[in-house]
Image: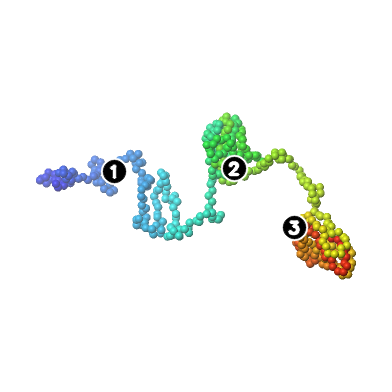
Amino acid sequence: MADNFIANAGAGGDTFGADDVGGVKYPRSKIGFGIDGTYTDVAVGAELPIALSAAQITALQPLATQPVSGTVTANTGLSQPLTDAQLRATPVPVSGTFFQGTQPISAAALPLPTGAATETTVAALNTKTPALGVAAPSAASPVVLANAVIVGAAASIAALNIDLLTGGASGWFDATNYRSVSIQIVGSAGITAGAITFEQTNDTTVAAAGNLWPVDEMAIATPTPIIAAVTIAANTIRSFGAPITHRFVRVRVSTAFATANVQAIANFSQATYWRQTHTVHQATAANLLATVSGTVTATVSGAGITGGVISPLTVAGVSVEASTAKTVTATGTTITNNSANGVLLFINASVVSGTTPTLVVRLQVQDPVSALWVDVPGAATASITAVSTTLLTVAAGVTPVANAAVSFPVPRTYRVAWVIGGTTPSFTFSVGAQYII
């Protein structure tokens, strides 16, 4: 059947728009609006008015203030989707309102980069990436954790076993990231003295007994670490300090207070704690009980020490070889050196006789393994032919002089030896020694 129909067919009636569906004509209509006596067609700029309640208006907020989900396409003025070259060349403009959870944030507040990316390869990006490991101090950006200031509540916390830091029954404060703490305990007016105990543990399921936390009272110049309950009286403020050696710490009310007005204020820090004093331990208590005051004079004794005062060390002369007449080559007696560095040998020839007599005196040292005697290189006098006194110096560090001085330390065991020559020679001589310390 055909659409549309003519009213009063055959009599020149108007044609009405209709849609024929299975022989039934459904009228086609235009929508308009207006009060009695007026009519306005619905069109762009003349939209159909809708009456809404205040609650409905509030619910229909502009989309800019509503959370956005799904895929969002930025209107950049460029073809969509953006090509790799477009993304590298120009930062994508961002506008409108964005949401973090349910809180709106503006585009200006977003932490977006302000420059354009210019690197086109991973290798180029690597040059902009900081190297792994510890940087030099001038290039390092240290991460510093702020101090944790804990202000315990000043009310309803005086009951037995309450932790003054957390306010919880048998509670613990997690001090994992801290190395030291200062704690101020305030006892308000009117309280009846109670007591607190400082405790620490790595396992909060373990009973408090045995987990005492040694603390110092800062008002004492030379404090001894406290490992017992501390009484807090009314109108008092007491400050304590301690290192953090366990994960969990607490300031537990070990004796209940009559009122709730006792409070703990703690400052946990990353700084290392330094005790003002150090404790000296000694197995025998009596050894630590000596009281020393005034001028202390040490009394010592030994060689070169008189009346407890050390005098310049001097050593008496030593007779190495007694004065006797000698006519043949021979060796003297063994001499022991008492840790001297060197020796001055005095060779005194008092009587000389014979035809062209000669005398040479030299110093020898002994091999401790084979017991053989060996001449000290250079430690020998020039040939002595007449009455005279000759000095031979043997010591480490002296300036060598031929037949007079040699740089050589005197060993523990030594002796002198002599060689006599000529016709019927005879030398009456002695050898004395003076040590060089």
Judge whether 434 appears above or below 37 on screen: below
Gap in angstroms between the C-alphas marked 2 and 3: 60 Å
Q: Earlier in the sequence, mark 2 or mark 3?
A: 2
Residue 115 placement (x, y as % from top left): 44, 57
Looking at the rendering, which quadrant does residue 61 occupy?
Answer: top left
- Whether pointer 2 and pointer 3 mark residues with C-beta atoms closer than 8 Å, the reply is no
User: Type of residue at label 1?
Assistant: Pro
Q: Who comes first in sequence, dot 1 or dot 3? A: 1
Callout 2 amino acid: Pro
Whether residue 417 is visible, yes or no, is yes
Task: Identify the residue shown where x is 75% and y is 42%.
Answer: 293
Question: Element at badge 1?
Answer: loop
The alpha-carbon separation of the residues under discs 1 and 2 comes to 74 Å
Crowding around mark 1 (Cα neighbors within 10 Å: few <14, some 14 to 19, many 20+) is few
Mark 3 belongs to which amino acid?
Answer: Pro
Query: Viewed as shown, does residue 146 lie left or right of 17?
Result: right
From mark 1 to mark 3, how far is it between C-alphas? 127 Å
